[in-house]
Image: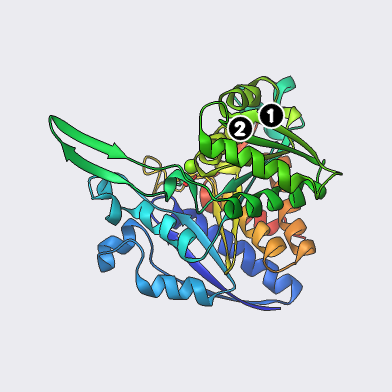
């Protein structure tokens, strides 16, 4: 197979973890006889420095013309004071919007040998395997009106949570379809006891569910869900969330698995799929060769499986990760007594070595 992959490393640890994932993809291509072409693009703070904007037109065109996008992370303290429209994070939102990436899949699975790395008790987290399906191009992230305006005696900040029937229905379908390939349970998260947009969300999800009688649907308020994720995470299979709730709950779900450095994601929609770790640019540990590249490498595996339909190759990466962890290799964030602490590049090398 021939494929063109846009590589947007971005800021902070993004610049260290993305090369590791590319290394793994190159090894897969070689081993399985594929031709992947990697084309680097600028994004985030790094693009601001170089071209004055977080999402240059060239990058957008590159992403649109590629078969898939591999992204690292954007943002950092240096750009925090900028107006919202110019911040690195805008690049990510712009890409999601421009590529129509409305469906964000964030699987949270516990690698058994990492149970000790979690802050939760082993018996609570053992066996968790859930998928957050997050709506990614709507809700309060994009709703209008938005902004900060001056009013007598101060200012007024506004954002709008808004969802249409169509937006809810299409993400609900993604969740039900995903559940069919898993344990056939969808928990739809909302705040329907307070918010009208959630009331509509619940109604539309219930309606879409009628075409999926084989899938079990439960509705759960977001505050209760945040609690249940810590109390008994094993009850969840697919969590269907709006943009904001999905952002928050996926960080929580990530931490159940021990480290946010382990969780990959896929963003799918009309154009090329985008694959990125769910963590950010981690400026505090950037440039030290200590960041965990596994989330990004696992994101590359999701790319092979979702965009290229290369299930065997994706499994090979998954198994290489498991084998490397089994052999005791750990980056600092997942270290435990008796394991071997390695840096970002050594972890990448070890995974390449363990690729069958
Ligand atoms: C995420 C991140 C982004 C989001 C930020 C960086 C804009 O937190 O992908 O979860 O809020 O969606
Ligand atoms: Mg987030």
Q: Which residue is mark 2?
A: 258
Q: State the separation of the CA atoms marked 2 and 1.
A: 7 Å
> From the viewer's perspective, is residue 266 above or below residue 38?
above
In the picture, the disc for residue 115 is: 1
Q: Residue at x 34, y 48 (%)?
A: 145
Q: Residue at x 58, y 53 (%)?
A: 167
Mark 1: which secondary structure?
helix
Q: Is mark 1 within 8 Å of ligand 2?
A: no
Picture coordinates of residue 269 (x, y %)? 60, 62
Q: How busy is the neighbourhood of tag 2: few (under 14 within 10 Å), some, or many (20 plus)?
A: many
**First in sequence: mark 2 vs mark 1:** 1
Q: Quadrant of the N terminus?
A: bottom right
Q: Residue at x 22, y 45 (%)?
A: 81
Residue 226 can be seen, yes or no: yes
**As drawn, is 324 to the left or to the right of 44?**
right
What is the residue that sits farthest to the right in this orientation? Answer: 214
| Residues marked 2 and 1 touching at CB (< 8 Å) | yes
Front residue of 92/18: it is: 92
């Amino acid at each position: 197979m021939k494929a063109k992959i846009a590589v947007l490393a971005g800021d902070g640890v993004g610049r260290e973890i993305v090369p590791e994932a590319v290394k793994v993809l190159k090894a897969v291509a070689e081993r399985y006889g594929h031709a992947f072409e990697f084309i680097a693009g600028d994004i985030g703070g790094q693009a601001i420095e170089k071209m004055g904007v977080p999402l240059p037109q060239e990058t957008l065109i590159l992403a649109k013309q590629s078969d898939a996008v591999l992204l690292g992370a954007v943002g950092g303290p240096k750009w925090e004071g900028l107006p919202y429209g110019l911040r690195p994070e805008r690049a990510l939102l712009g890409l999601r919007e421009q590529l129509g990436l409305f469906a964000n899949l964030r699987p949270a699975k516990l690698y058994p040998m990492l149970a000790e790395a979690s802050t939760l008790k082993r018996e609570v987290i053992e066996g968790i395997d859930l998928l957050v399906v997050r709506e990614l191009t709507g809700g309060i992230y994009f709703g209008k009106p938005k902004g900060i305006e001056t009013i007598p005696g101060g200012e007024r900040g506004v954002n709008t949570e808004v969802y249409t029937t169509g937006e809810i229905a299409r993400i609900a379908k993604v969740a039900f379809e995903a559940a069919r390939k898993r344990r056939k349970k969808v928990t739809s998260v909302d705040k329907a006891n307070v918010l009208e947009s959630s009331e509509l969300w619940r109604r539309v999800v219930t309606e879409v569910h009628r075409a999926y009688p084989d899938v079990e649907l439960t509705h759960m308020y977001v505050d209760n869900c945040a609690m249940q994720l810590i109390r008994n995470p094993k009850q969840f299979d697919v969590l269907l969330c709006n943009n904001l709730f999905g952002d928050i709950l996926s960080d929580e779900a990530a931490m159940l698995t021990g480290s946010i450095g382990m969780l990959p994601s896929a963003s799918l929609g009309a154009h090329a799929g985008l694959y990125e770790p769910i963590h950010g640019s981690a400026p505090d540990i950037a440039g030290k060769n200590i960041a965990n590249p596994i989330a990004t490498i696992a994101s590359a595996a999701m790319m092979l499986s979702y965009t290229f339909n290369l299930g065997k190759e994706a499994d090979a990466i998954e198994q290489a990760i498991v084998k490397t962890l089994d052999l005791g290799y750990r980056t600092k964030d997942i270290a435990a007594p008796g394991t071997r602490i390695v840096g970002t590049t050594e972890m990448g090398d070890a995974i390449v070595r363990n690729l069958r």
